[in-house]
């Protein structure tokens, strides 16, 4: 079984993200998705993102910022990671309220975080970078095996199937 997550944020090469993590004394991903069930209080990546954001917005919500890395069974490690400022997990189905679940407005400090992470790409070989490195957008990320929760916004009143 896999997890599907809709996110607002930006995409970045794993090589660039890992350079940022390494510089901040956090273990690199090497293209392996973080264990999302540890988000936000125990996952070192989530904690780092929140620390950076909270420097610009002390009232930021620590649950909003996370890294997602796609993973498909039988495929090699992914070279693309996503840094999210809003996310909505989907178990079987879900109504998405874009303005509530995935607001387009970029929160305070997120652009500074994006620029800081992208700055580590200057030392990454061009062959390890992805197309559209740093592009902000609305993305869907699938990760083989459930690696965490789906957030508080699941609609438990509807049948799961």
Image (spheres, helix red, strand yellow):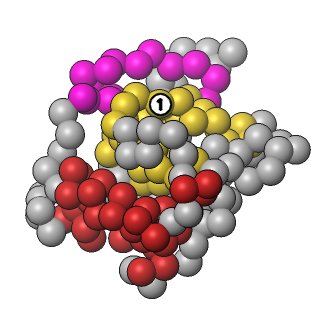
Q: Quadrant of the N terminus?
A: top right
Q: Is residue 14 at all visible to an observer of this figure?
A: no
How far from the left and from the top, in percent, is residue 35? Answer: 61, 60
Location of residue 3 with respect to 115 vertically, above or below: above
Magenta stretch encompasses residue 44: no
How far from the left and from the top, in percent, is residue 141? Answer: 57, 36
For disc 1, the neighbor class at 10 Å (few under 14, some 14 to 19, many from 20) is some
How far from the left and from the top, in percent, is residue 56? Answer: 12, 62
Dot 1: element = strand
Quadrant assignment, res 57: bottom left
How far from the left and from the top, in percent, is residue 96? Answer: 41, 19
Location of residue 99 with respect to 54 vertically, above or below: above
Quadrant assignment, res 146: top right
Q: Nearer the viewer, residue 156 or 150?
A: 150
The residues colored magenta run: 91-104
Judge from the rendering whether residue 136 lies leftward or rightward of residue 11; answer left or right: left
Judge from the rendering whether residue 103 lies leftward or rightward of residue 36; answer left or right: left
Q: Quadrant of the C terminus?
A: top right
Q: Main secondary structure of the magenta part?
A: loop
Q: Residue furthest front?
A: 126
Judge from the rendering whether residue 9 lies leftward or rightward of residue 78; answer left or right: left
Write down the residue under mark 1.
139
Magenta stretch encompasses residue 97: yes
Picture residue at 54% right of the left edge, 56% below the top: 126
Judge from the rendering whether residue 13 lies leftward or rightward of residue 65; answer left or right: right
Q: Is residue 32 at all visible to an observer of this figure?
A: yes
Q: Nearer the viewer, residue 49 or 156?
A: 49
Location of residue 78 with respect to 50 vertically, above or below: above
Picture residue at 80% right of the left edge, 50% below the top: 76
Q: Nearer the viewer, residue 108 or 11?
A: 11
Picture residue at 33% right of the left edge, 18% below the top: 97
């Amino acid at each position: 079984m896999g997890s599907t997550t809709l996110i607002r944020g930006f995409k970045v090469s794993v090589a660039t993200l890992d350079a940022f993590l390494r510089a901040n004394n956090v273990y690199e991903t090497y293209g392996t998705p973080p264990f999302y069930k540890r988000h936000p209080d125990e996952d070192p990546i989530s904690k780092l993102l929140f620390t950076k954001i909270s420097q610009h917005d002390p009232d930021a919500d620590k649950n909003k910022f996370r890294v997602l890395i796609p993973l498909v069974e039988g495929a090699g490690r992914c070279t693309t990671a996503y840094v999210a400022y809003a996310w909505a997990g989907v178990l079987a189905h879900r109504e998405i309220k874009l303005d509530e679940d995935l607001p387009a407005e970029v929160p305070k400090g997120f652009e500074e975080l994006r620029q800081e992470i992208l700055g580590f790409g200057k030392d990454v070989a061009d062959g390890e970078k992805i197309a559209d490195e740093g592009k902000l957008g609305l993305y869907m990320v699938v990760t083989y095996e459930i690696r965490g929760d789906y957030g508080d916004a699941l609609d438990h009143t509807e049948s799961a199937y």
